[in-house]
Image (spheres, coloured by chain):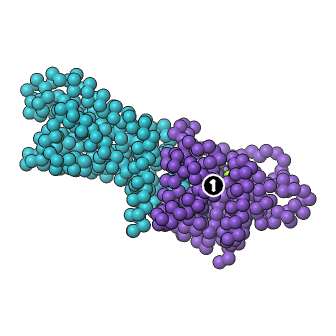
Chain colours: A cyan, B purple
Amino acid sequence: MNKVFRDTYYLFIRGFKQSLRPYIALMPEFAVPIFFFVVNSAGFQRVSDLAEFKNYAGNYLEFYAPVALLMAIFFSTGSAGIEVVTDIANGYMDRLFVSPVHRISIVLGKLLATGARSMIQAAIMLAFVMLIGAPFEAGLLGVPILLALAFIFGMAWSGIGLTLAFLTKNPRIVQSSFVFFIPFSFITTSQLPLPLLSGWYKAAVMINPVTYVLEGMRALMLNGVGPETVGTIAVGFLAAALFGLVTLGAALFAFRRLSA
Amino acid sequence: MNEAIRVEALTKKFGTTTAVDGVSFNVPKGEFFGFLGPNGAGKTTTMRMLATLLRPTSGQAWVNGFEISQNPDGVRRSIGFAMQAVTLDPLATAWENLLLLGVLYGLSRKEAHQRGSELLELMQLTKVADSWIKNYSGGMRRRLDLAAVLMHKPEVLFLDEPTEGLDPAGRRVIWEYLKKLNGSGATIFLTTHYMDEADYLCERISIIDKGKLVVTDSPKRLKEKVGGTLDDVFIHYTGHRIQDEGLNPKAADPYTQMNT
Ligand SMILES: Nc1ncnc2c1ncn2[C@@H]1O[C@H](COP(=O)(O)OP(=O)(O)O)[C@@H](O)[C@H]1O
Ligand SMILES: [Mg+2]
């Protein structure tokens, strides 16, 4: 057990460094969320005149700020699969497999590194959106709660890329798996609050677990922690955990096949 | 058990190709053993089975007394495996590569540091030890790969064409070091296409062709038997024609190389 912890720790450090390199590759991970944030909060500004909207946020920028965090998490953790497929392709995974490292440490180290990356990315985005004028009502104590949610959801999201990496070992397939972010992030309450949605779209939004993760973040940012929001925040954690159960379950299953 | 490696009727089939076909041989502890054969003969496949990276279709093998399927961890702790292609983390420095492997093999950080600096010195990589591997030349990578495999002072060393791509001086350094290692008790299992290398280093060689062992003896006795150089011996047993090799339907996507 001790060895599993030790190996996991060292592979976590390695995975974390790997996820930051080459440094230049970090640019798009910030650029895309910032682009959406700046463009949408300018473009949709008049939406905040709608009566139904007024219960949710003072202006569209505030409403959209949590989406920028969510996107930062999508983009930073989506690369976990690419890192793993690169390890498989250049033989590094075999180097680990011939060593006496416990197999589970290889996956755990990667996941923890991904979670840590996700927290850092979310923290940087939070600082950025606050600089532009977004609120954070949950205050200083709310920050660890938000980061914990980013940690869990980051790992959960990385499960998609990891599963594809272990199953296909194909860099191009894994690279293009980022497209999953489109339905999962757009079919949510990212653009409009739930009462303004309708039809099949609304139904789809309601079964998308990411909706609840987003609403949890939004509650922390716009309303803070209190009796009215604690439920929404808890549901956010639950949705992230359930989503992770599915994606990481699949990833572990695929990994066992690869390492058998 | 006095055998470092004992192989009994080891077989590996990939679909309809039989890559290794009922191979049996023994390598006593402390021997420098050469495993020669044309491209596609089954050398790498045999080594990957012995190193616990591939499951045999049938047959058994023991490495350092551990059965490869029943006690793979025992095998992994005993061996170092320099694979045919270099397997390093390209986005890490030489130091990072060596230290991580050291600690994963159970060295303390201090021990790993000490061992790492010895090996960097030996491979004449001390000056570039803090640069990322992706900037290394082929020869530098090959030398560092060998250093990585030697970090934990393995009892049994598997070397799959270890001097491929090295210049004559580089080969000489490696040869002398391998001799020294072997002199201090390590068993070495080497494949190579350089007959001068096999002749100089190996006490005994086996020739494998189309998955089957053809002959095993000392280079001296083989040369006497055939009446010529080791090149003549090789051609005598495996033929003049370039052989048909099977294809690998699972080969990596060419885009795999994009990140390195
Ligand atoms: N993963 C694989 N899938 C299918 N065929 C393979 C695979 N690996 C090796 N082979 C085939 O098995 C045979 C032996 O290959 P290999 O052991 O690499 O030979 P060598 O190392 O002696 O050149 C070849 O015909 C090769 O194409
Ligand atoms: Mg080979």
In the picture, which quadrant includes the N terminus of chain B?
Answer: bottom right
Q: From the viewer's perspective, is A157 left or right of A256?
A: left
> What residue did someone put label 1 on?
B123
- Say left or right for B12 vs A24: right
Query: In this rendering, is residue A51 above or below B197?
Result: above
Q: Position of residue A139 (x, y in %)?
A: 14, 45
Q: Is residue B65 above or below residue B138?
A: below
Assign a secondary structure to mark 1.
Answer: loop
Give the residue displayed 28% in from the left and 50% down from the top. Answer: A152
Asked whether mark 1 lies closer than 8 Å to ligand 2, one says no
Foreground residue, A119 or A70?
A: A119
Can residue B61 be seen at all in this image of the molecule? no
Pointer 1 chain: B
Answer with the quarter of the image where residue A221 lies: top left
How packed is label 1: few (under 14 Cα within 10 Å), some, or many (20 or more)?
Answer: many
Across and down, in percent, residue A110 comes to 40, 52
Which residue is pictured at 26% across the width and 25% down the height? Answer: A39
